[in-house]
Image (cartoon, rainbow, N blue to C red):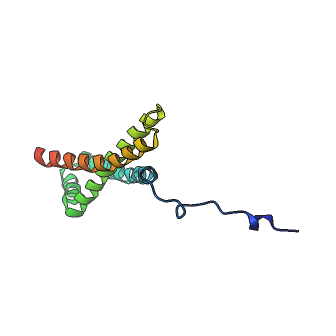
Amino acid sequence: MANVTNNRPLSPHLQIYKPIPTMVMSILHRITGGALYFGTILVAWWLIAAASGPGYFEFVNGIFGSWIGRLILLGYTWALVHHMLGGLRHFMMDFGYGLEKELSTRLAKLQVVASVVLTVLIWIVGFLVR
């Protein structure tokens, strides 16, 4: 009896495909979505600390105010903005707009630039308001 599965071709995977902007944005959208789960735990921790009293709130604020805390919050802000822009791009495509290859590639590249610019603007405003 012959083994028919040995002659079957393997499905191509990420190593086969050339990364294109829309593919990279799709992968980043999933990664930022996962990162938002962990970032939301930090937001909940901060809210719980605020409700727990001034001592614990100062402790949590001290962690978030450290350089590593600010770096994590910066990453969370970028993930939130990037994921939101990706969601808006997909929402637009759900209505049939931006499906052309050139336009979808341009929008994918714009998403990276816009997410970085908006994140920097949010942080500038945050520091100015302080």
- Residue at image coords 46%, 39%: 100
Which residue is at the front of the view, 54 or 20?
Answer: 20
Residue 99 against residue 54 in the figure, above or below: above
Q: Is residue 54 left or right of residue 28?
A: left
Residue 48 in sight in this render: no
- Residue at image coords 16%, 46%: 126
Which residue is at the front of the view, 66 or 96?
Answer: 96
User: The N terminus lies in which quarter of the figure?
Assistant: bottom right
Which residue is at the front of the view, 15 or 75?
Answer: 15
- Residue at image coords 20%, 55%: 61
**Residue 98 falls in image quadrant:** top left
Which residue is at the front of the view, 67 or 12?
Answer: 12
Count of number-bearing discs: 0
- Could you say where residue 99 lies in the image, as x and y percent from the top left? 46, 38
Quick one: which residue is furthest to the right in this view? 1
- Residue at image coords 28%, 46%: 114
